[in-house]
Image (cartoon, grey):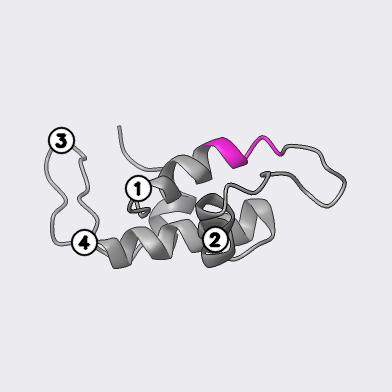
Amino acid sequence: MALPQELRDSVPSSPFETDSDVIELSDEELRAMVDANAREYLGISGEELLQRLRERKPLTDDTGNSLPAWGPVTMLARLLLDD
């Protein structure tokens, strides 16, 4: 399964794309993808998202509601955490 176009646009081109549509990302490329998606879908920077995850802060918007996009973006961001 290939990445959706909006995700491919936020990731620098990778020399590791294969015939099976698997793309290997460096930490830098993953960080860029997390940042782009956090900004677009959550309205915060990727670094702010990572900080909230490190501090185990609630992942809600300003009104206290959980956003549907938290799940997929957080799943990517957790790949960058050291715990």
- Expressed as whole percent of the image width and height from the top left, the position of residue 38 reads 58, 56
- Looking at the image, is mark 3 or mark 2 earlier in the sequence? 3
* Image position of 27 with respect to 2: above or below: below
In the picture, measured across the screen, residue 22 lies left or right of residue 78, that is left
Q: Quadrant of residue 11?
A: bottom left
Nearest to the observer: residue 15 or residue 79: 79
In the picture, measured across the screen, residue 21 lies left or right of residue 51, that is left
The residue mark sitting in front, 3 or 2, is 2
- Mark 1–mark 4 Cα distance, whole angstroms, equals 26 Å
- Mark 1–mark 3 Cα distance, whole angstroms, equals 30 Å
Q: Which numbered circle lies on residue 42?
A: none
Q: Which residues are magenta?
A: 67-71
* Image position of 71 with respect to 16: above or below: above
The residue mark sitting in front, 1 or 2, is 1
- Mark 3–mark 2 Cα distance, whole angstroms, equals 34 Å
Residue type highlighted by circle 4? Ser
Q: Which numbered circle lies on residue 20?
A: 3
- Mark 1–mark 2 Cα distance, whole angstroms, equals 13 Å
| Residue that mark 2 sits on | 51
| Residue that mark 1 sits on | 83
Give neighbour class at mark 3: few <14, some 14-19, many 20+ (Cα, 10 Å): few
- Looking at the image, is mark 1 or mark 2 earlier in the sequence? 2
- Looking at the image, is mark 3 or mark 4 earlier in the sequence? 4
Residue type highlighted by circle 3? Ser
In the picture, measured across the screen, residue 35 lies left or right of residue 27, that is right
- Expressed as whole percent of the image width and height from the top left, the position of residue 73 reads 51, 45
Q: Which residue is pictured at 51% across the width and 44% down the height?
A: 74
The residue mark sitting in front, 1 or 3, is 1
Q: Quadrant of residue 44?
A: bottom right
| Residue that mark 4 sits on | 14
